[in-house]
Image (tube, coloured by chain):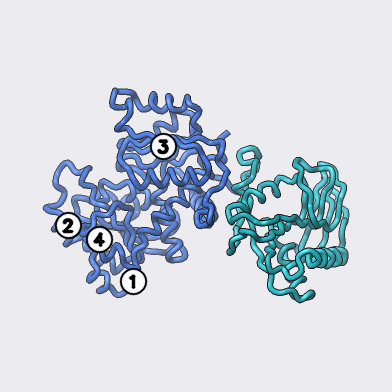
Amino acid sequence: MKELSVNHLLGIKYITKDDIDLIFETADHFKEVINRPIKKVPSLRDITIANIFFENSTRTKLSFELAQKRLSADVISFSAAQSSVKKGETLIDTVNNILSMKVDMVVMRHSNPGAAYFLSKNVKASIVNAGDGAHEHPTQALLDSYSIREKLGEVAGKKVVIVGDVLHSRVALSNIYALQMQGAEVKVCGPKTLIPRHIESLGVTVEPNLRKALEWCDVANMLRVQNERMDVNFFPSTREYAQQYGVDLPLLESLNKEIVIMHPGPINRGVEITSEVADSGQSVILNQVENGVAIRMAVIYLLASKIQ
Amino acid sequence: MSQKVLLTAQEVTIILHRLACQLIEKHSDFSNTILVGIQPRGVFLAERLKRILEQEYKTPAIALGYLDITFFRDDFRRTDKPLEANKTKINFIVENKKVIFIDDVLYTGRSIRSALTAIQSFGRPSVIELLVLVDRRFSRHLPIQPDYRGRQVDAINNEKVKVSWKEQEGEDGVYLITS
């Protein structure tokens, strides 16, 4: 039987199509497990995992914690806001201190791109990247593809448009890698100021017009406008953004076909999508959250099986 | 590598009928009994027994589930081979039911130990019994014995007992393989 080609999940860039297939197959089994009356398996009872979040997160942190607990791992969680990082401790020192408490795996979110990669080279533990700056967020991309596969049968050959704040988005980059690896076609759509220059070099096309993009696609992944990362104004006003790049029900219904609406959360309701769209039958946003737990269980299980 | 026939197709058929009769003797109409095939290889035996019971002995329809034990095994990270999961399909609650675990070969008993833990995710059965086609003697790591056994076999450690099924390998039979 197969195993992952990597010992860490640092980004989609570092894994293969076979890895993605294996993660999805394993997630199928865990999805069945989390729908049982007793939603827990004892596989990881001798594994300790540290969740280190140097950046705020609700959904990802909860999802990882729940996945770890469903696998019976021991979990310690830590947020930078309450830690010695504030006192000036370096990243390696912080993590090595945690590792001396015999931790086997570290799930880390950090605002610096490459932080997870850096850590994997310098400490002895299996590292899972839960988001590093505007670089990658691999488990989000995996659960997005998994949700597309669940809704549409397969990812290969599908047309996906990523709408909005691509510039600040780690979700966008991981999604582009993951979707292309599985044979999907990817477009990005958004205000010119929020589309990185030379993004075509990743093999995606840019479509500035939202209606055209939606008419082309099977799936629209609506990214959150990351106000907290914007030090200057990238668009004149939120209202104008919503008019140009927000999806509302009349727009959705005027398309010539039914498309799938995704959002990595948290939603700015009325900005990227309106409430009616978020709660409509075409939206798979809550499925994404459920699948997130199954995908993270699969990733953690498969990585843990490689720990010596 | 040499291969010796332990049970021919005809012997397998006779044994399956005997096992079916033993089940009827104990469980009569199966109204409160559930068959659970242990993935992957116990499933064929469980399906075959269900078919024999329903078609040849005219019992009412019997509930059948498949139980995968991969995530409940005690050798996670202790074997060189990665563990491969299979599908669990149990569409009922086993609370207060009589559960019969069905597997092809009983060897160390560790799979059954895992299955005993795994089944708890679906409720608390009133009784759990174990049916195996082949019981390898002298090889148990745990105090687990079958309630119904097809054939008892003495095999030493470097020998392997292989059960083949018509549905899967093209013919029924049990073989002893020496490497």
One can see residue A180 in this view:
no
Mark 1 vs mark 2, CA separation in Å: 23 Å
> Chain B shown in which color?
cyan
- Using the rendered image, report if marks 3 and 4 lie on a common chain: yes
- The residue mark sitting in front, 2 or 4, is 4
At 59% from the left edge and 56% from the top edge, which residue is drawn?
B122
Circle on res. A258: 1
Q: Earlier in the sequence, mark 3 or mark 4?
A: 3
Of helix, strand and loop, which one carries label 1?
loop
Circle on res. A241: 2
Mark 3 vs mark 4, CA separation in Å: 31 Å
Instruction: Give the residue number, with chain letter if any, for mark 4.
Output: A273
Residue A88 at x, y percent in the picture: 29, 23
Of helix, strand and loop, which one carries label 4?
loop
Instruction: Give the residue number, with chain letter if any, for mark 3.
Output: A51
Residue A27 at x, y percent in the picture: 51, 53
- Using the rendered image, report if marks 2 and 3 lie on a common chain: yes
Residue B171 at x, y percent in the picture: 79, 65
Chain to which the residue tagged by mark 2 belongs: A
Q: Is residue B148 above or below residue A117?
A: below
| Chain given the colour blue | A
Amino acid found under the numbered disc labelled 4? Ile
Q: Earlier in the sequence, mark 3 or mark 1?
A: 3
Circle on res. A141: none
